[in-house]
Amino acid sequence: MKKILNSISEIKNKVKVDEIMTQSLFYLDEEDTAFFAIYTMGKEAISSIAVKKKDQLTGIFTERDVINRIVLQGKDPKKTKLCDVMTKVPKTISSDETVIKASNVMKNNKVRKLIVVDKANSPVGIISQTDIINSMQKIDDSYRTLLWNPKFSIIILAVIILMFVINYLIFRI
């Protein structure tokens, strides 16, 4: 039984960020205009752009930033620089962390995307809520494999029989 419980725990920790992240990360300079970023996002069908200054990651510009920091503030995207409307100091996660941890970081920080970094803290990709939702199939497949394992079925059957026997012995009045 302990082995099966370990297997269930292992499934949760099996899927790593680097297995499901989007590896292509689009960058723009923080001096570029918001309009150019929005145009690029539309053209490339992406919902965020990493922002850098001299090859150093300084922020992330997302669809949320477009709405909250440009549209709702009445700013002209053609005159607004990314450094003025981006999310500074974007949340990051290591590529070897679990998807469960990435999900918790997103939830706790109320963000929908994390920049994925390697051991040297260099950006290598991005992970989004959509990536996590799409990975659920992989996790579900792992659970199905475990549940159809004959050892698991035998243990469950043995527990049920044991419950009936105990029930009979206690209540056979």
Image (cartoon, rainbow, N blue to C red):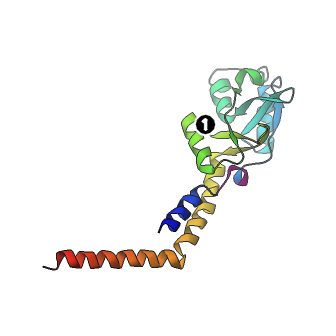
Identity of the residue furthest to the left in this view: 173
Q: Nearer the viewer, residue 72 or 108?
A: 108
Crowding at dot 1, Cα within 10 Å, few <14 / some 14-19 / many 20+, comes out as some
Quarter occupied by the C terminus: bottom left
Does 10 appear in magenta? Answer: no
* 7 to the left or right of 135: left
- The kind of secondary structure element at disc 1 is loop
Residue 25 percent location from the top left of the image:
79, 42
The residue at the point 62 percent across, 24 percent down is: 72
The residue at the point 80 percent across, 46 percent down is: 24
Identity of the residue furthest to the front in this view: 2
The residue at the point 74 percent across, 43 percent down is: 46
Q: Amino acid at mark 1?
A: Val
Above or below for 157 versus 54: below
Identity of the residue furthest to the right in this view: 54
Residue 3 percent location from the top left of the image:
52, 67
Q: Nearer the viewer, residue 166 or 47?
A: 166
Residue 117, located in which quarter of the rendered image? top right
Q: Nearer the viewer, residue 57 or 80?
A: 57
Residue 1 percent location from the top left of the image:
47, 69
Above or below for 162 versus 6: below
Above or below for 60 versus 116: above
Q: What residue is pinned by disc 1?
A: 111
* 171 to the left or right of 28: left
Which residues fall within the magenta stretch? Answer: 15-19
Residue 38, located in which quarter of the rendered image? top right
Residue 71, located in which quarter of the rendered image? top right
The residue at the point 71 percent across, 24 percent down is: 85
For the stretch drawn in magenta, the main secondary structure is: helix
Residue 114 percent location from the top left of the image:
67, 39
